[in-house]
Amino acid sequence: MSTKTAAIRIEGAERSGRFVIICEHASNAMPAPWGDLGLDAAQRAAHIAWDPGALGLAWGLAEVLHAPLAHACQSRLIYDLNRPPHHPGAMPERSEIHAIPGNAGLDAQARLARTEELYLPFHAELRALIARRLARGEVPILVTVHSFTPVYFGQRRSVELGVIHDRDPGLARAVLEEAQARTGLDARLNEPYSAADGVTHTLALQATPMGLPNVMLEVRNDLIADAAAQQAMAAQLAPVLSAARARIETTTGEAA
Amino acid sequence: MSTKTAAIRIEGAERSGRFVIICEHASNAMPAPWGDLGLDAAQRAAHIAWDPGALGLAWGLAEVLHAPLAHACQSRLIYDLNRPPHHPGAMPERSEIHAIPGNAGLDAQARLARTEELYLPFHAELRALIARRLARGEVPILVTVHSFTPVYFGQRRSVELGVIHDRDPGLARAVLEEAQARTGLDARLNEPYSAADGVTHTLALQATPMGLPNVMLEVRNDLIADAAAQQAMAAQLAPVLSAARARIETTTGEAA
């Protein structure tokens, strides 16, 4: 089963796995009525517009884990679904070194329209997906999948896998330890970002109030540059997530 | 402007005040298709079915504060909108000393139907109300309005006003101090319930992820037993809320 609106596509809603995979920065599409925001083709293809490779990785994880996948259908520069409507980054006037002409001086009506057309339906559909599982007695585990650029403001980053948590660090710590044990990746907790940078909004909105285990994965985008690399990374990380899940279930005595 | 569905009624969505008043337990209506859940008239009128007096108080507060009011349209025994779908209290089999026959052994499909028809639209409409204000550059302050019974499991309660917070205690502490300074009420922090009892779900869902100031008010229901008493209590508590708002805005340096 697949649900698609302008804001969100949900694939495999009927899949029976415990994980729910989420990719808020899946797309660099800039559809009407918003258009290209005054950016050139190189800017629209760059990491400021989306998280390159993240959707392919998320697809792979969802398939191996038999999990539903919820992903965005438009660029984060039109509305960054991982930010609330009053956050300057929701419809940013600048991203890294780039001015975003189509976001300059947006008035209240323009901000409201994007909020109503993108932010609200994305999070309402995602909440419904999660709530339906809760109503049936299942407790989903939320995983948001992101990528980051190897060079940021001119600095090279050596971290390869960032494992980030919202308020409850339990799953993230287990994922970090399993990633360090099972992969050769340079994996670190709360790098290159953390909740203090406002990057866990989706988790704060969808997982924390429900008490659901959750983690945000940030993969350096040069490691998932094509479909083969994305599949290979999914094959590495799916067992990490499964082992981390088993570990928190053992700790809490929760039934699998 | 008034919006009404089976799950929620929003009144005064266009009002320009900073507060948003919420009343999840406003009604003891038990409409079709759910019906009376096997309860007699006395049980349906009692505090197990709703928070008596809370809606009248919430109306009064909304009017004085020029705030929108969002309230439920059906009994908490059909779905308690202040609980997530997997919480035993969402569709409780017992409430205090009463068995709820129509909630005994609900299967997944019945729980799912109530979640989809009541919980999801209530919180989606409320989120939209809040997000529209955020998109316009306003930062609403959320107040949930509840009442509690003077006698619980045979014990008399002397507290008259409970002031309860979710994760951020800032506004609640200011409300408590203003209530103690401005009223003769026996006001206490996190009594007769607290977040640890799971009573702040609406605040955790709607306020905390957005960083919005929030407080839950619990008034002993013998103090708001009729319309005159509800209006009088609203006239007492509205200045308490306004003064508390001014206090946190001074503290944080936030603009009014």
Image (cartoon, coloured by chain):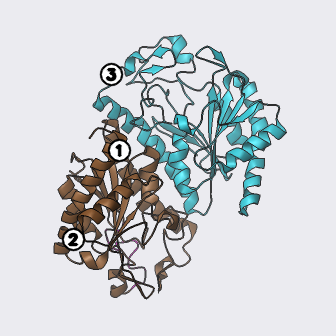
Chain colours: A cyan, B brown
SS type, badge 1 = helix
Where disc 3 sits, the SS reads: loop
- The answer to which image quadrant residue B155 occupies is bottom left
Comparing B43 with A197, the one in front is A197
Q: Secondary structure at mark 2?
A: helix
Instruction: Please state the horizontal and vertical placement of residue A248, each as a whole percent of the image.
Output: 73, 54
Quarter of the rendering occupied by the C terminus of chain A = bottom right
Q: CA distance from mark 1 to mark 3?
A: 30 Å
Task: In the rendered structure, find residue B230 and report the number of the disc placed on it.
Answer: 2
Q: Nearer the viewer, residue B84 or A157?
A: A157
Give the chain of mark 2: B
**Tag 2 near tag 1, CB within 8 Å:** no
Magenta stretch holds residue A55: no
**Amino acid at circle 2:** Gln
**Quadrant of the rendered image containing residue A219:** top right
CA gap, disc 2 to disc 1? 31 Å
Q: Residue furthest left?
A: B228
Residue under label 3: A105
Give the residue type at disc 3: Gly
Res A3 visible: no
Residue A249 is situated, as x and y percent measured from the top left of the image, at 73, 58
Q: In the rendered image, is residue A4 in sight?
A: yes
Start-end of magenta stretch = B25-39
The location of residue B62, given as percent across then percent down, is: 23, 57
Q: Amino acid at mark 1?
A: Thr
Answer whether residue B36 is magenta in the image. yes
